[in-house]
Image (cartoon, helix red, strand yellow):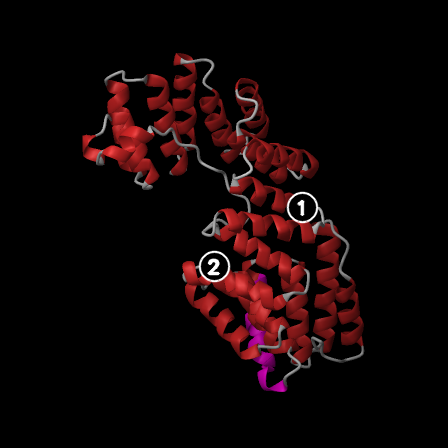
């Protein structure tokens, strides 16, 4: 499951052949496309290579192989095949699009933008090109440009679910939370299996304080991908906010079972054990152990903030004060953001030798 922003991989389709015969009876290009749609990219590459060796419809054969290479993360091979497709057909918009996606995957943003622009000069209303350029602009934090591209993709094809998802990302990043929720909801209405949209809508609901709806969305993700540890962490936080502490605890434990190296699972687990208003769940020493592990895996302002709360719950207020000061300093000097007001409030609490409690 994708977690935030994904690249939409473009395939070349030959529907008539793909729908009327099994893969073994199709021409090499049609067979390659059929295999690629089944995510059998290794065999798809072999089929496209067969077409290239026979010099059958070279632009589409090279593009098909490039798409499968890209799906496997073989970026250099994908770029080489796109180059070959363009050499044989210089006005092949889809080849520029796919090469742009490969450059974007390789973080060669300028080259990716140039290829997207070329693709759109050849096919101005191609929703795939507009969407993927919007994704890249979102990654580059150029959100207004991203929204413009997503809007154009939606205008070109109002049934294109990824464009609503992409616009939701840009809206969420710019603080338009309600609008982001609406776009994620439109995404799931068009494509009920679009798990990223449920995940991101859950995060938006959480930000809006609608924790029951957030938990419902995360549960939808877990029902489909029960091996996804981040979904359990997200639902654990939503449960905690609903004061469903037992359920939250179980989710954090399950996340750690699935991924023993997931720092946010240690962090969420520790936070519950040291700040819970229900004393039955307070375990100071265990919270310190978990928080220290989170910091060792990923030192950041949030993990340091949790460690400070755990130290305070364990009666180590001087250490808690110093650690909270480190969290504030890390937030401002390393992460380049203003420390949340809650950090300052917690620091004052530890100075007063009082553990922190969630509302």
Q: Residue furthest bottom?
A: 280
Q: Is residue 293 above or below residue 52?
A: below
In the rendered image, residue 355, in percent from the top left (x then y), is placed at: 72, 79
Q: Secondary structure at mark 1?
A: helix
Picture quarter containing residue 306?
A: bottom right
Left or right: 81 in relation to 338: left
Q: Earlier in the sequence, mark 2 or mark 1?
A: 1
The dot on residue 27 is none
Label 1 Cα neighbours within 10 Å, binned few <14 / some 14-19 / many ≥20? many
Residue drawn at point x = 61 percent, y = 32 percent: 152
Left or right: 60 in relation to 170: left
Dominant secondary-structure state across the stretch colored magenta: helix
Q: Is residue 222 above or below residue 197?
A: below
Q: Is residue 190 above or below residue 272?
A: above
Left or right: 208 in relation to 197: right
Label 2 Cα neighbours within 10 Å, binned few <14 / some 14-19 / many ≥20? many
Q: What segment is highlighted magenta in the picture?
A: 279-295
In the rendered image, residue 186, in percent from the top left (x then y), is placed at: 57, 48
Q: How many marks?
A: 2
Q: Secondary structure at mark 2?
A: helix
Picture quarter containing residue 33?
A: top left
The dot on residue 171 is 1
Residue drawn at point x = 63 percent, y = 62 percent: 206
Q: Is residue 44 above or below residue 197?
A: above
In the rendered image, residue 24, in percent from the top left (x then y), is placed at: 19, 33
Q: Is residue 331 magenta?
A: no
In the rendered image, residue 112, in percent from the top left (x then y), is placed at: 55, 27
Screen quadrant of the C terminus: bottom right
Whether residue 250 is visible: yes
Instruction: Give the residue at mark 2.
Output: 221
């Amino acid at each position: 499951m994708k977690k935030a922003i994904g690249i939409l991989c473009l395939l070349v389709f030959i529907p008539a052949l793909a729908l009327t015969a099994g893969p073994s009876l199709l021409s090499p290009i049609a067979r390659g496309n059929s295999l690629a749609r089944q995510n059998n990219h290794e065999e798809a590459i072999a089929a496209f290579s067969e077409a290239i060796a026979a010099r059958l419809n070279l632009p589409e054969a090279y593009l098909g192989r490039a798409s499968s290479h890209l799906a496997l993360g073989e970026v250099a091979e994908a770029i080489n095949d796109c180059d070959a497709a363009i050499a044989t057909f210089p006005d092949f918009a889809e080849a520029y699009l796919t090469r742009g996606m490969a450059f974007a995957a390789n973080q060669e943003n300028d080259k990716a933008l140039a290829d997207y622009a070329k693709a759109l000069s050849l096919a101005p209303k191609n929703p795939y090109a507009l969407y993927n350029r919007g994704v890249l602009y979102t990654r580059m934090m150029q959100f207004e440009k991203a929204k413009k591209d997503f809007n154009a993709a939606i205008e070109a094809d109002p049934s294109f679910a990824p464009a609503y998802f992409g616009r939701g990302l840009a809206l969420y990043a710019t603080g338009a939370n309600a609008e982001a929720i609406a776009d994620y909801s439109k995404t799931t209405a068009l494509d009920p299996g679009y798990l990223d949209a449920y995940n991101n809508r859950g995060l938006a609901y959480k930000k809006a304080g609608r924790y029951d709806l957030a938990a419902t969305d995360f549960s939808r993700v877990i029902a489909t991908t029960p091996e996804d540890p981040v979904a359990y962490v997200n639902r654990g936080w939503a449960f905690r906010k609903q004061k469903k502490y037992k359920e939250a605890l179980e989710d954090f434990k399950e996340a750690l079972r699935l991924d023993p190296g997931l720092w946010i699972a240690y962090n969420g687990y520790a936070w519950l054990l040291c700040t819970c208003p229900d004393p039955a769940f307070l375990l100071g020493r265990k919270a310190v152990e978990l928080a220290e592990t989170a910091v060792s895996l990923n030192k950041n302002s949030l993990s340091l903030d949790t460690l400070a709360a755990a130290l305070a719950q364990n009666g180590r207020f001087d250490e808690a004060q110093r650690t909270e000061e480190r969290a504030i300093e890390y937030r401002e000097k390393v992460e380049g953001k203003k420390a949340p007001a809650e950090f300052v409030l917690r620091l004052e609490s530890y100075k007063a030798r009082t553990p922190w409690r969630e509302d």
